[in-house]
Amino acid sequence: MVFIHLPLASFLDIIKGKALEAFSGQIPLTDMLWSILTAFGLAAAVCLVYRVTFSGVVFQKSFVLALLLLAMITAMVIRTISSNLVFSLGMVGALSIVRFRTAVKDVTDTVFMFFTITIGIICGAGQYLAAFLGTMLTGLIYTLVYCFSHKLKSGHYLFTIHYAPVLEGEVAALIKSIKNAKVKSRVTGLGGGTELAVELLIGEADETRILSFEGRDGVYSLHLVGYDSAFSL
């Protein structure tokens, strides 16, 4: 029986060489192309959901373009580091020194950014079916929940009125007659009158009754604005 004794350093070099050979292959261009295009298509669907459910003041096209780029860039990075160990270690080192300080005002925008990054990761890993099903299901559920909550919140108003003491009884009767009315603030002593702020959930008939106070003697100011309560669904 013959025993071959290899130095420890040589043995470690063999193991390291085999590991590098396994993780340093060339990336097929077709795989990279499919990852980028699939990420772009699914991110476009996410952008459509974002546009339909957008409820902010100013819609920014640059943010939508950023969502598309996030998905494609993430897919490209994941596809690259999944087949090359050296690139993966270098990418970890590069990303560890990057600091993103752009402020995102709406938490929903942050969630959509995470959504597109997740799509890029899954597409970069080559799991196209999981990416498609996950994107479609998540987008559909979010859209249905948004439409349902938007329907529930329709009719929310913030009613403010500044009136003279002579109208105290009429204003109190009006507020009492409206269901789900919540008095938010009441300030007295303003020029001998009272300022009342009430959150309301009203229909067209109640709105007409409220606006009938406008222009009456003793009513100094009256405002009825759409109100989106942060604590309602």
Image: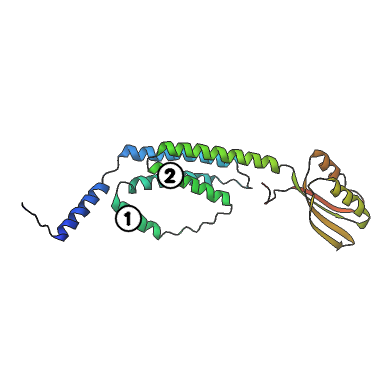
Amino acid type shown at disc 1: Leu
Residue 169 appears left or right of 79: right
Residue 72 in view of the camera:
no
10 and 197: which one is in front? 10
Q: Residue at x 70, y 50 (%)?
A: 229
Give the residue furthest to the right: 166
Q: Residue at x 74, y 42 (%)?
A: 155
Amino acid type shown at disc 2: Gly
> Where in the figure is residue 164, as x and y percent of width and height?
90, 56
Give the residue furthest to the left: 1
Residue 102 in view of the camera:
yes
| Image position of 166 with respect to 43: above or below | below
32 and 147: which one is in front? 147
Q: Earlier in the sequence, mark 1 or mark 2?
A: 1
Residue 70 appears left or right of 148: left
Residue 69 lies in what quarter of the image?
Answer: top left
Q: Residue at x 80, y 39 (%)?
A: 204
Q: Is disc 1 placed on a helix, strand or loop?
A: helix
Neighbor class of circle 2 (other Cα within 10 Å; few <14, some 14-19, many 20+) is: many
Which numbered circle lies on residue 144?
Answer: none
Which numbered circle lies on residue 120?
Answer: 2
Q: Is disc 2 placed on a helix, strand or loop?
A: helix
How far apart are the two marked residues, 1 and 2, measured between alpha carbons?
Answer: 19 Å
Residue 122 appears left or right of 63: left
Quickly name the residue at label 1. Answer: 89
> Where in the figure is residue 178, as x and y percent of width and height?
83, 45
Neighbor class of circle 1 (other Cα within 10 Å; few <14, some 14-19, many 20+) is: few
- State if disc 2 and disc 1 touch (CB < 8 Å): no
> Where in the figure is residue 146, as x and y percent of width and height?
62, 41
Q: Residue at x 38, y 43 (%)?
A: 124
6 and 144: which one is in front? 6
> Where in the figure is residue 43, as x and y percent of width and height?
48, 41
